[in-house]
Image (cartoon, rainbow, N blue to C red):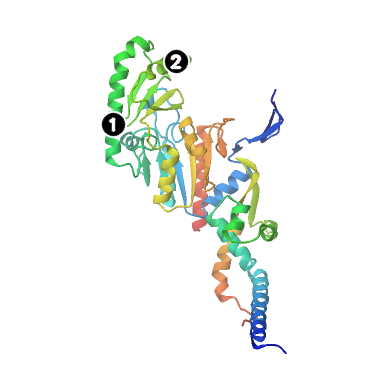
Amino acid sequence: MMSKKWRQLETRLLHLLQIATSFQRLNKHAEEALGLSIVQFHLLQKLKDRPGISSLELARAIELHPSTLTQSLRRLVRKNFVFIDKDPRDSRRKILTATRQGHNAMKKFTADFPGLNLKVPLL
Amino acid sequence: MPRACASSNACWVVFNHRVCKRKLMKYLFSQTGNKLLESLTFTKTLYAFDFDGTLSRIALDPDAAKISPKTAGLLRTLNDLAITAVISGRSVRDLRRRLPFTPRFLVGNHGLEGLQTPPSSLKAAAKVCTKWTRQLRKNWEQVVHDRSVIIENKMFSLALHYRDSRSKQKAKRFIFEILEELTPSPRIILGKSVVNLIPAGAPHKGVTLLELMLDARISSALYIGDDETDEDVFSLPDSRIFTIRVGYKKKSRAHFFLKSQSEVPHLLRKLVTFHKRNRA
């Protein structure tokens, strides 16, 4: 028979799972509606504050695993929101910059997000 | 024997089985340079400029150097849109005379006449410079036979100019000969046909730029210079600072280069346009 403690833990885990799923849906919904997911917006914002930051520094700044970051960055580059090139001072290092399109997308996101019609079941 | 590759942007030097990859500067108006310039305008950035050879053309007579009306106008517009600084080897008094307006930060004497230099340090530097001038004048005629070599006392540092000299190498040798006798020993910074003498312990342009960033609470900076004195900024190991050298130099630590001083107004125009576009 399952103890009371186990049942409490299970409920908490279930809640966490629900939050994660809701966040994923919200992210997807925001990307469809505004062209940027929340994670991508956060990345772009960091890039705006620190132009020319390296991917490693960016990963550290937003506490994201470098491989997860690479995937998100690839999407942003495909959308022309981020530009990546070699650092002129050290070719082993890559520098990242937000582009004009990325800047405009961020502006649109900031303006429209509060009014975004969320059809996501939140907890 | 070391060998180097003819790659467009990188130079591989192989020596004693060790490979050292030294990157060479990129042209500022390349795709990377343009993108970086634009992204710098999205955030609060400090734009810092050297004066001689950057904002003004190098003049034969240091006193004749002046900023062109076009450059001055663009710099003034940029100053209205963002935070600008002029960090020069000239004294602040001299800079004020040459600039038609006062930028947010004006730093003279290679950073000594800056923000947080205590008056006691300035007083000590002025005292040292007076002592050096006296020592130099004493032996000047015997050692420096070249009359075109001139001493410029900038109050807190000295500059020995030999631009007008017919034999620059010879003039430089004479200057170094006479400098050996100086007490206290100066910090020597070589410039374009000029030897700068700075009191030991004085801050350099790099330290000054970091101080300015701290003072203005700015997280990124763009520095444009042309001289050896600017290498102190170019070699700062700070990824928040991007640097541009006016004139290409293989050994420079700057990120980007401009082909000549005549491209500086173009850079200013670009920055102004990007800032105005952000406001639209």
Q: Residues within 10 Å of mark 1 (few under 14, many from 20)?
A: some
Residue furthest toward the bottom? A1
Q: B219 or B207: which is nearer to us?
A: B207
Name the subunit of mark 1: B
Q: B16 or A95: which is nearer to us?
A: B16
Q: A32 or B206: which is nearer to us?
A: B206
Residue in the image at 27% along x and 40% along y: B119
Vertical side of B272 occupied by A41: above or below: below
Q: Amino acid at mark 1?
A: Ala
Q: Amino acid at mark 2?
A: Arg
Residue B280, label in figure = none
Q: A61 or B163: which is nearer to us?
A: A61
Residue in the image at 28% along x and 24% along y: B131
Q: Residues within 10 Å of mark 2 (few under 14, many from 20)?
A: few
Image coords of residue B14 (percent x, y): 70, 30
Residue B238 visible here: yes
* Residue B86 in which image quadrant: top left
Distance Cα–Cα, label 1 vs label 2: 26 Å
Image coords of residue B74 (percent x, y): 44, 43
Residue in the image at 65% along x and 50% along y: A84
Quadrant containing the N terminus of chain B in the rendered view? top right
The residue labelled by disc 1 is: B126
Residues at marks 1 and 2, common chain? Answer: yes
Vertical side of A81 occupied by B187: above or below: above
Of callouts 1 and 2, which one flags the residue occurring earlier in the amino acid sequence? Answer: 1
* Residue A92 in which image quadrant: top right
Q: Secondary structure at mark 2?
A: helix
Residue B164 visible here: no
The residue labelled by disc 2 is: B173
Image coords of residue A46 (percent x, y): 56, 59
